[in-house]
Amino acid sequence: MSRVVLVATQDNHNSTITRSTSFSTSDLALTTPASFSNLTYFDYNQVQLDVTAKGNMDKIVECYFDDMDVPYATKNMSASDIEDISFDIDPNDAKNGYHTVEVRLYQSIDGKKGAEVDPLRFEIAVWDGRTQTPIIWLGDYKS
């Protein structure tokens, strides 16, 4: 619980006015699970991206796939929702090769985007077992 106290005084008068208010605060955080590694390839039939969105408030989580300008998927979460969420990528979109992923987390205020934390950005490799085409990965393998 946080508290703010405002005290106002006047130069030419002896009166003082004090107002205080208390409010709750919460951290807003976005992480990948400890088991995540972008060095592990995904089967094209099972591309599921897991993230953890923490914060005791309503949230909006957006997933961008392959540098799209608009979100591939969006999830609205209430303060009481489970923090671990998944985004499933359609096999028609997850072709053999490397793909870029960006996940963004916002505070939701009346269903609109509020404060945002630093987004997660990473690359993944998708392997289509029906082809012998190699995966050419241009990334720097940072996790």
Image: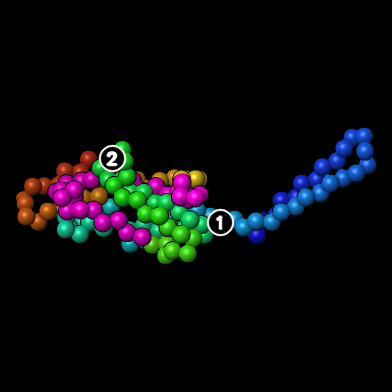
Q: Secondary structure at mark 1?
A: loop
- Asked if residue 44 can be seen in this view, the reply is yes
Residue carrying label 1: 26
| Residue 110 included in the magenta stretch of the image | yes
Q: Residue shown at 30%/56% (left/top)?
A: 87
Q: Residue at x 23, y 45 (%)?
A: 99
Q: Where in the figure is residue 85, as x and y percent of width and height?
A: 36, 60
Q: CA distance from mark 1 to mark 2?
A: 30 Å
| Residue 81 higher or lower than 65, as above or below | below
The answer to whether marks 1 and 2 mark residues whose Cβ atoms lie closer than 8 Å is no
* Residue name at image x 87 percent, y 37 percent: 10
- Residue 26 in the image: state x and y as whole percent: 56, 56
Q: Position of residue 119 (x, y in %)?
A: 40, 46
In the image, 135 versus 53, the foreground residue is 53
Q: Nearer the viewer, residue 27 or 62?
A: 62
Q: Nearer the viewer, residue 16 or 100?
A: 16
